[in-house]
Amino acid sequence: MSSLSIITLLILTLCLYSNEVSSSSEISVSTPFAIGSRLILRSIDDKAEKPDYAVELNATNFDSVLKETPAAYAVVEFFAHWCPACRNYKPQYEKIAKIFNGADAVHPGIILMTRVDCALKKKSEIRSIDDGRTADRLLNWINKQLISSYRLDDEKFENDQLQKNASDIGQIARAIYDIEEATSTAFDIILGHKMIKSETQASLVKFFQLLVVHHPSRRCRKGTSEILVDFDDFSSNKKETDSAGEKGELRNYQICGKDVPRGYWMFCRGSKNETRGFSCGLWVLMHSLSVRVDDGESQMAFTTICDFIHSFFICEECRQHFYSMCSSVSSPFKKSREFVLWLWDTHNKVNKRLMMEEASLGTGDPEYPKIIWPPRQLCPSCYLSGSGKNDGNSRIEWDHDEVYKFLIDYYGKTLVTLYKDKELLVEKRANGVLAEDLAVSASAHAVVVPVGAALAIAVASCAFGALACYWRQHQKSRKYKYLHFLKNI
């Protein structure tokens, strides 16, 4: 049974226990769960009064908050609103919540601090905290559990707790939410700089079509498709020099859902606020797209990404460097493998150039220096025997077959591991609830149906099923054809 399922089973017991016995506040922490959106982190900033940093959980939002949180852990305080001791403890708990929750948190995306009013019925699974009566004691308990060293006086952007183990291939799973962040940030930049012109519109539409089909995030696929459906309406009546979206129509759309961007990074977070972040997220997005296209789409995906960067990346020098590498490709890609390896090689060329520039200027991230990628720790089989170090100075002999297999797995299956696990869990739980409801409904509302009526119902059901199957297949066909819809614009 997964951690989230167990979470759902035990809160009810604790809440009922709290209702029946003492008025003291009880705190618990959930086992680790996957990463999601910024809803619970951004919502606290919308209050006019002094905000509560801890997130209030109830029967309505409990499952959705645990499903969507970007944090790897959750701490839950169980209290009763009528309890004086609970009210007196609140300031202590809020001191810790301020460190981990909210857009201005010192250590965002690591722990979600929540509270549950046990005067109300709800459900989840928890692990008891033995001593958390003061802010110091609670933070000490957290540090022991996570083997961390957070302090009450930590300052923002001193990211000393970042995971730096390059041999941990599973870290890329956290990047799925950085891809959402990068997609949404890029969209905001495009709108903010009014970059949608008559000469760039086709490039943007083609890139959106690529995202609709191959973006690893379901939320981004859905949001992009909604924009594409109405995109012509935004620009059809505008003059050639106008910016589509100048009047704000496109700003009403959230390309990856209403809770993105979150305002911080997970896998792509640097040790300094100005390093990594968006550029890292954009590279991961491009790699994730490259490993998802079919052979017949490889050349179009290549030109689509090149045109998008050339039209919309705001760093002029970076844009020109990237486009020059695109222009150096002399023959069209016929296989997706060619495109995957070209993008990988291009990324390494960029890293090699930046390694020298950052070394001379001292502008690199000291905890995440640029390297030729992947390092041996991640893919030892990618290196042929006798190859040099991946420090940018030595010549490396690559086994391109092994590199390709690594890229497909790393940016494909491994990247979406947490995302898929969470979706399957939610779907499984939903199906379980539905099956239970249907069983109860069937037993409670069973009726006798004449044989003729039953046969008619069966025929109608089969006809409806066939129609639904045809519609789904038609929609799937349209989805992939849509990528080529504006190919010749």
Image (spheres, rainbow, N blue to C red):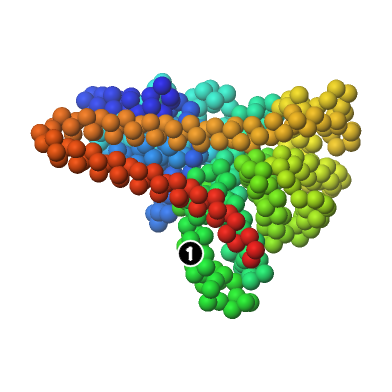
Q: Position of residue 368 (x, y in %)?
A: 73, 37
Dot 1 falls on a residue whose secondary structure is helix
Quarter of the figure with residue 91: top left
Name the residue rendered at 74%, 47% in the picture.
Answer: 333
Q: Is residue 469 visible?
A: yes
Quarter of the figure with residue 58: top left
Q: Which quarter of the rendering shows the C terminus?
A: bottom right
Total tally of numbered discs in the picture: 1
Q: Residue furthest bottom?
A: 239
Name the residue rendered at 33%, 25% in the picture.
Answer: 9
Q: In the image, is residue 9 above or below residue 259?
A: above
Q: Which residue is mark 1?
A: 230
Nearer to us in this view, 278 or 22:
278
Name the residue rendered at 46%, 34% in the picture.
Answer: 422
Nearer to us in this view, 474 or 59:
474
Nearer to us in this view, 366 or 420:
420
Quarter of the figure with residue 449: top left
Task: Name the side, left or right, on which 58 lies relative to 74.
Answer: left
Q: Is residue 264 visible?
A: no
Name the residue rendered at 78%, 41% in the picture.
Answer: 345
Q: Position of residue 97 (x, y in %)?
A: 46, 39
Q: Position of residue 114 (x, y in %)?
A: 40, 37
Q: In the image, is residue 341 above or below residue 381?
A: below
Name the amino acid, label 1: Asp
